[in-house]
Amino acid sequence: MDELAALIDALVYTRSRNEKLRLIAEYLRATPDPDRGWALAALTDGLDFPAVKSSTIRNLLMERVDPVLWTLSRDFVGDTAETASLLWPAPDTHPAPPSVSETVELLSAMTRKSVLTELPLLMDRLDPSGRYALLKLATGAMRIGISSRLAKVAFAQAFEVTVEEVEEHWHGLTPPYEPLFNWAAHGHDAPDTANMPTFRPFMLAHPLEETVVDLADYAAEWKWDGIRVQLVRMGGETRLYSRGGDDISGTFPELLDILPMDAVLDGELLVRGSHQGGEQGGAASFNALQQRLGRKVVSKKMLAEYPAFVRLYDVLILEGTDLRERPWNERRAALEALMPRLPA
């Protein structure tokens, strides 16, 4: 944990994007498996330890230090993890700090009951910087200015691969991403994710640089008031991904049965409804869509009042054929030919 703690400390105090990339890349090159994979998962919000809550940390501290001191310190510092790491009483002995892998294993095994005794044992094995890293890791609230995309770019730079190649495999793998490191760092075969319902990089439009263009070379799309998504069906499974590659399938279950074939489709997620622009069966406003976003549980009433659909823009893969190397007009023709096979 000492190396991860040093990395987090350095990232907290670094504003430069290039310096952050350098720090993460150096850590990934220098750290052995599987520690670096777990660290990468932490930086990309890929870890979840449900037994550890901010309230758990607060209660543990208030048992060990004056409650008024805790409250005043938390208000001054502004961060629960940092306050707890600084106020935690120093242990009488100094056992060896755990590795990242051991930490993840212990946190994963904790229950709401056992966390009250097991988390303090971990805290006692670390110095203030290590405790800060531990609590950030445990609560899943890094908030150190590192996006998932930035961490993937750093991985790509560390091992001289492209971020597009990383994203091609990323969503078919789970922490600690050993197949990904074996490929990028050790020269093994690339992970086989071809038949998995994984996110693929979008074929995005880019701003024009030319000042004079022939409009016949371009096509225009309506600007819909939704969010860009990717609908993927592979190997009998369907997933819905946001533009950033987050899996939002559980929030929109009605979209998981609409593809009758294996495909990767790009489009705009919208909702219908009897209000906010959707009165005639068209797309409702973004405010209506927001009623559905971010929900872990979607009620039958919500499904009925704000039914979701996808306005398709592009087809990236269709029935085993990768179309991404083909020009847009060919992909568009394939999409138009596909439409009669899809529900309206």
Image: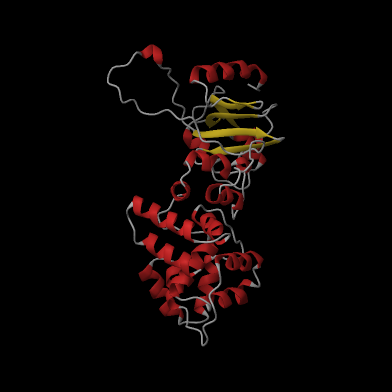
Count of numbered circles in the view: 0
Relative image position of residue 185 (x, y in whole percent)? 53, 51
Q: Position of residue 81 (x, y in %)?
A: 46, 68
Judged left or right of residue 232, residue 5 is: left
Dividing the picture into quarters, in which one does residue 104 lie? bottom right
| Extreme-front residue of the structure | 187
Image coordinates for residue 124, horizontal then vertical, percent? 53, 79
Residue shown at 51% from the left, 84% from the top: 91
- Judge whether 274 appears above or below 294 on screen: above
Please identify the quarter of the rendering in which residue 77 is found. Answer: bottom left
Whether residue 118 is situated above or below residue 23 in the rendered picture? below
Colouring rule applied to residues = secondary structure
Tell me what residue is drawn at x 55 percent, y 36 percent: 200
Residue 187 seen anywhere in this rendered image of the structure: yes
128 and 157: which one is in front? 157
Q: Quadrant of the C terminus?
A: top right
Q: Is residue 272 visible?
A: no
